[in-house]
Amino acid sequence: MQAKQLSYQIEPKENLFPAQLLLIDADAATAAARQSWQIWQSANFSEISPNQAPIINRLE
């Protein structure tokens, strides 16, 4: 059996990763989230999800 040659060319059809990838420090992110949660709890909001807090778009 004789080996055959194979050649190929990759042609990207679309940008699979349009946004840049970003590496974060997981320990620092966890520490920041923990600190935010402690502040939220100290304001007696622990029964309310911070994700459900109203967003003020325009201050008057």
Image: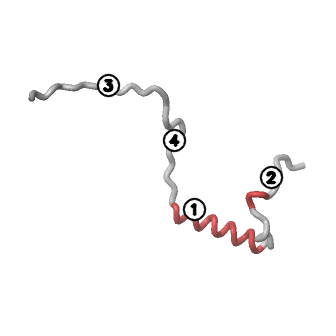
SS for dot 1 = helix
Q: Is residue 28 left or right of residue 13?
A: right
Query: Few, some or many C-alpha atoms within 10 Å of disc 3 (few <14, some 14-19, many ≥20)?
Result: few
Q: Are marks 2 and 4 in contact (CB under 8 Å)?
A: no
Q: Which label's residue is closer to the chain start, 4 or 3?
A: 3
Q: Which label's residue is closer to the chain start, 1 or 4?
A: 4
- Residue to which mark 1 is pinned: 29
Residue 58 numbered mark, or none:
none
SS for dot 4 = loop
Up-down relation of residue 54 to residue 19 (above or below) = below
- Residue to which mark 2 is pinned: 55
- Residue 31 x/y as whole percent: 59, 68
Q: Are marks 4 and 3 in contact (CB under 8 Å)?
A: no
Q: Are marks 1 and 2 in contact (CB under 8 Å)?
A: no
Q: Which label's residue is closer to the chain start, 2 or 4?
A: 4
Mark nearest the camera among 4 and 3 is 3
